[in-house]
Amino acid sequence: MNFYWPKKHKEDLRKTLKKIKNESWSWQLPVFLLNRCWLRLEKIKINELALYLPLDNSAEAPELKKYNQRIISGQDSLLALQECWNEFGMEDFYRALRISWKWECIGNKGWTYQKYISFINQYKKKIIHKELEVPIIVLGRESSKDNHKVRWIKDELITNNKV
């Protein structure tokens, strides 16, 4: 993530790192969102993250999970479909499938429920182990297939201009 950082951004990151130095885990901890196109850095709280970056949790639907498990285990796709209809109902199965397709069409830059949970767990571990780092989610560009990427910033990176 080597590109130009305005002095204001570096200072905001430094102040935030200093502020969270002795913090314990909380949903009030900061997260930065970086829009590279406009070089805009926005600080929010973890508990606001799902409002700014909606989660695609369509893959977590039990109907689709069960269907995919059956396919992975080698079951015929038509038989797997029929068994899921019997277990969950045709209407519920297709509702889950439509939601999944909708997310696929509108896209969310790879920000899935699993990535969100992984991010939260990683942040918790860093805070518990007193690893002084602040997360920046580098937003994927609108007109590209770039996914959002999580980067962790330490004070040394800011000081040495390696951010």
Image (tube, grey):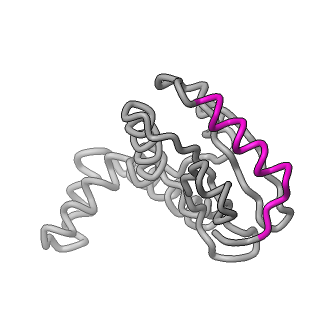
Image height of 130 relative to 112, above or below? above
Magenta highlight on residue 3: no
In the drawing, does residue 127 fall left or right of residue 63? right
Figure quadrant of residue 71: bottom left
> Where is the N terminus found, in terms of image quarters?
bottom right
Q: Nearer the viewer, residue 162 or 115?
A: 162
Q: Give x and y (percent) for residue 148.
A: 60, 61
- What residue range appears in magenta? 4-20
Name the residue located 65 percent from the left edge and 28 percent from the top edge.
19
User: Tag count in the figure?
Assistant: 0
Instruction: Choose between 160 and 122: the one closer to the eye.
Output: 160
Tell me residue 99's x, y (percent): 53, 54
- Residues 153 and 86: in front is 153
Using the image, determine if residue 160 lies above or below residue 50. below
Q: Where, quadrant-wise, is the C terminus in this rendering? A: bottom right
Viewer-side residue, 150 vs 7: 7
Q: Main secondary structure of the magenta part?
A: helix
The answer to whether 62 appears left or right of 20 in the picture is: left
